[in-house]
Amino acid sequence: MTLPPELEEKFVTDIVAYYEERERKPYVTSVERIAGRQARREMLLETLETRFGALPEELTTLLDRIDDSQVLKDLQRPAVLSDSLETFEQEVLAHL
């Protein structure tokens, strides 16, 4: 069954409101989750590039494998505090 556009929009709005009320937290769409993960990854890369210069492709490939935004957030502190890229890479491997 296909709803007219105005009814479909109201339906989606009502569903989101229902889940927000039920969970007492905002509904986050998959697009928002992906955008958040990409933003965290870019921030992490920026931090590493600022500290260590050009990054090896292997490291960026490892970071691409991380789907969890919280893991990327958790890696921000080691990105700032690690004394080398090798040390940071060990942190990344520990989170995979």
Image (cartoon, grey):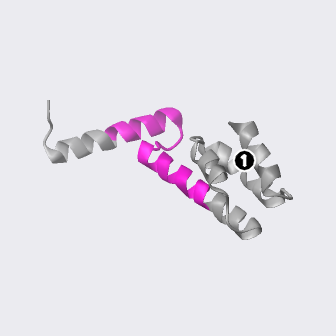
- Classified by dominant secondary structure, the portion drawn in magenta counts as helix
Please state the horizontal and vertical placement of residue 61, each as a whole percent of the image: 60, 48
Amino acid type assigned to the residue bearing label 1 in the image? Asp
| Residue 70 vertical position relative to residue 46 in the rendered view, above or below | above
Q: Along the horizontal axis of the image, is 28 left or right of 9? A: right
On the image, numbered disc 1 is attached to which residue?
74
Percent position (x, y) of residue 80?
A: 79, 60
- Whether residue 10 is visible to the viewer of this picture, yes or no, is yes
Describe residue 6's horizontal placement relative to residue 14 as left or right.
left
Q: Which of the pair 76/56 is nearer the observer? A: 56
Sort mark 1 into few (<14), some (14-19) or many (20+) by Cα contacts within 10 Å. few
Residue drawn at x 70%, y 64% is 47
Q: Quadrant of residue 48?
A: bottom right
- For the N terminus, give its image quadrant: top left
User: Within the magenta stretch, is there residue 38?
Assistant: yes
**Residue 50 is drawn in which quadrant?**
bottom right
Q: Is residue 29 visible?
A: no
Along the line of sight, which residue is nearer the eye, 15 or 96?
96
Q: Which residues are magenta?
A: 14-42
Q: Is residue 75 above or below residue 21?
A: below
Q: Residue at x 60, y 42 (%)?
A: 66
Query: Where is residue 22 drawn, in percent x and y?
Result: 48, 32
Q: Quadrant of residue 79?
A: bottom right
Query: What SS does tag 1 mark?
Result: helix
Q: Residue at x 48, y 48 (%)?
A: 34
* 92 lies left or right of 30: right
